[in-house]
Amino acid sequence: MTKLKLNTILILFAMLPALQLFSQQDSIPPPTPANIPIDEASGLIVYQEVVSEPGTKSVLFNRASEWLHQFFANPVHVTKVRDASSGIIKGRHQFELFRTDKDGNKIHAGMVLYSFKIEARDERYRYTVDELLLRQQSRYPIEKWLDKNDPNYNPQWEEYLQQIDNYVRNVFAASLKEAMKPKKEYQEEEW
């Protein structure tokens, strides 16, 4: 074997770890904000939590139904399924996103559509918020905002993702959890 061929083979072997590193970097998913829950099977954003709460399936379903009337301006329009026998409530709703300009002013940035499901069982319930889409002429999946390697990436997307996370955890879920707690019974004072 000539010295040139031997040097070429040695150089290729020396470059092999670097080539493997590059190929691994392409297969590593882009980092996502820590708060955003990604379903491993689908790769979609899915907020889901099981909450233990005293009460039968029927009682918890009724509390969730009452919450709908407190939380949504038009609960009949929002809900698509209200099945007391299975303890399931499904619906679709939307909320507004804002962007902040250089002067700190909040400007309308669009509407986020989402699906929700509340499932009641004895002593617990589960809520799920998923199918997050930006309302446009065509539906734009929010998951596209997670890809920082996208050539169209916009740093504003981080703020939008934070707003979505805040809405689901601190508005939607917090309100539901409060409404699902048993009502305090007041006893009339005897005198």
Image (tube, rainbow, N blue to C red):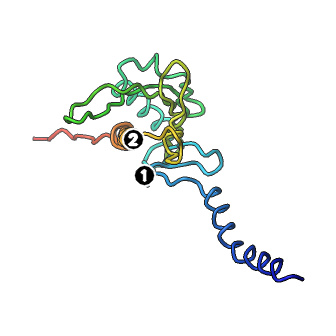
Q: Relative to 72, say whether 53 is above or below.
A: below
Q: Relative to 123, say whether 119 is above or below.
A: above
Residue in view at x 28 percent, y 42 percent:
184
Residue 160 seen from this side: yes
Task: Tell me if 171 is positioned left or right of 90 in this view.
Answer: left
Nearest to N terminus: mark 2 or mark 1: 1
Of badges 2 and 1, nearer the viewer stands 1
Coordinates of residue 43 in the picture (x, y in percent): 60, 46
Q: Disc number at residue 35?
A: 1
**Residue contact at pointers 2 and 1, CB within 8 angstroms:** no
Q: Disc number at residue 173?
A: 2
- Quarter of the image for residue 65 reads top left
- Quarter of the image for residue 160 reads top left
Identity, as a three-letter code, of the amino acid under mark 1:
Asn
Q: Quadrant of the N terminus?
A: bottom right
Residue 182 seen from this side: no
Depth check: 159 or 149 in front? 149
Q: Relative to 60, say whether 10 is above or below.
A: below
Identity, as a three-letter code, of the amino acid under mark 2:
Ala
